[in-house]
Amino acid sequence: MFSGLNHRRSSVLAFGLVATSSLATAGPCDIYSSGGTPCVAAHSTTRALYGAYSGPLYQVSRGSDGATTNITPLSAGGVANAAAQDSFCAGTTCLITIIYDQSGHGNHLTQAPPGGAASGPQPNGFDNLASAVGAPVRLNGQKAYGVFIAPFTGYRNNAANGTATGDASEGLYAVFDGTHYNTACCFDYGNAETNSRDTGNGHMEAIYFGTGDGSGRGTGSGSGPWIMADLENGLFSGLSPINNPADPTISSRFVTAVVKGEPNQWAIRGGDATSGTLSTFYNGARPSGGYNPMSKEGAIILGIGGDNSDGAQGTFYEGVMTSGYPSDSTENSVQADIVAAKYVYDTSLMTSGPALNVGSSISLRATTACCTTRYIAHTGATVNTQVVSTSSSTALKQQASWTVRTGLGNSACFSFESNDTPGSFIRHSNYQLMVNANDGSKIFHEDATFCPQAGLNGQGNSFRSWSYPTRYWRHYNALGYIASNGGEHEFDSATLFNDDVSFVVSAGFA
């Protein structure tokens, strides 16, 4: 899987990487190099991480024909050309297939293979790929896209070049979405096993972000989420895996997360990626029990654990791995560069197409040729499509009418309350659309939040799941699902996909 992407430095130079750049245009990896700890992996879908880099940042594949294209910066050292992606992906779905390494070491990230903990949901056991549109942001006013990791999504390179192995020194940083996380294992970025299996304590050194793995280990102060380190068989917030009160709950929308390690020394640092400086949450000795000395293997993971534990969620914007243990002052300069990139969450980027008005009652008509008299309705808890007209019964009209609410899990999107069952909302459960009572939980709120966009077949709206943005509302055999274009289930069939996920919104019947 990876051999064809494992280019050496000379081939990546052809992408546009220049080995040095002026201080005026220095990026994070120029700063690390000046500090004597050069990047050996540099990944970002939002911007170039070297001041002179103009090569590809990532590759997308579109659902209509499987064609791919590389997305580059608008200019050397600049923000990704989101307009090129939008043009290429217009009227269809797109996945992020490769996240290119900008360092020249060829450490590109591709679809993660099966591992010891989990085989991915794809027929070949690989993990899912991320939607190309799940995490839009702005940098210095320019639109770009991050990598929205839903559960069962992951990227990996098991044949990396130049990354730290054994007890060698390294540094890592990443910029994450501080509001997108869960308790599952493991939303990681960094150094992991080369065989996708748990090979023992100390065989990983990766940044982790979330609220722990449910084992009772690895917590900070408050309720989380926290920046921690996944060192294999433990999420560590400090010397002890149990608790480090100095590791705070993260509240910023964009977070800079830092982990670095050298023989019998390691540190966790972090800060708001949009303002201020980095703070040190831990700086001290390695934990006992197989973590000193370390036995790092040098693979690179994103969004998964070292053994391919793939139940986590999170959003990645940029990150690097270095050779050598960076100084705090070098990392502080990198933080200043990140702040200067001006990450902004622009809610207007999350939706498109015909506007929805919060508080209005709507109906949603199917646009597939077979089914243009059918509307999204429900029978009990099951969402389905039914033929509805002005002469239908009052009960059926109510079942096919929905009140638009501000998104329970993300206020930039929407939730849909049942008109005949107040307090109950359309949500997805095991990929099927259901009508369930709002229980107030984080997972319910996320599962009941959908982001409308212009209909993929040119009619009305398509409704993308916020928590699984490769998946859209779809009617299939008269039942409602969240479906991906050509995914692993029968209801993911690519046949008529664009039609089946497009709905015309009009006034509610009731």
Image (spheres, grey):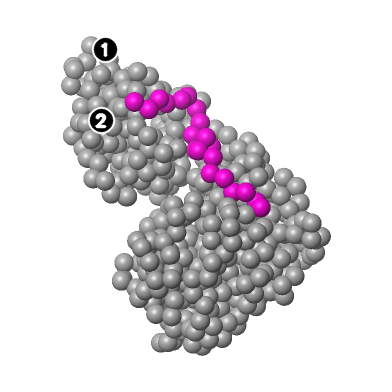
| Viewer-side residue, 36 vs 398 | 36
Question: Does 175 sit left or right of 287 as displayed?
Answer: right
- Residue 367's image quarter? top left
Q: Quadrant of the C terminus?
A: top left
Question: Which residue position holds label 2?
Answer: 418
- Residue 198's image quarter? bottom left
Residue at 64%, 41% (x, y): give it: 141
Mark 2: give few (<14), some (14-19) or many (20+) Cα within 10 Å: many
Q: Mark 2 or 1 closer to N-term? A: 1
Q: Position of residue 366 (x, y in %)?
A: 37, 25
Q: Can residue 58 be seen in this snapshot?
A: no
Residue 323 highlighted magenta (yes or no): no
Secondary structure beneath dot 1 equals loop
| Viewer-side residue, 90 vs 507 | 507
| Viewer-side residue, 304 vs 330 | 330
Task: Report the disc number at residue 501.
Answer: none
Q: Position of residue 456 (x, y in %)?
A: 49, 31
Range shown magenta: 340-359
Mark 1: give few (<14), some (14-19) or many (20+) Cα within 10 Å: few
Q: Position of residue 189 (x, y in %)?
A: 52, 65
Q: CA distance from mark 2 to mark 1?
A: 19 Å
Q: Position of residue 22 (x, y in %)?
A: 81, 60
Cβ atoms at labels 2 and 1 below 8 Å apart: no
- Residue 94's image quarter? top right
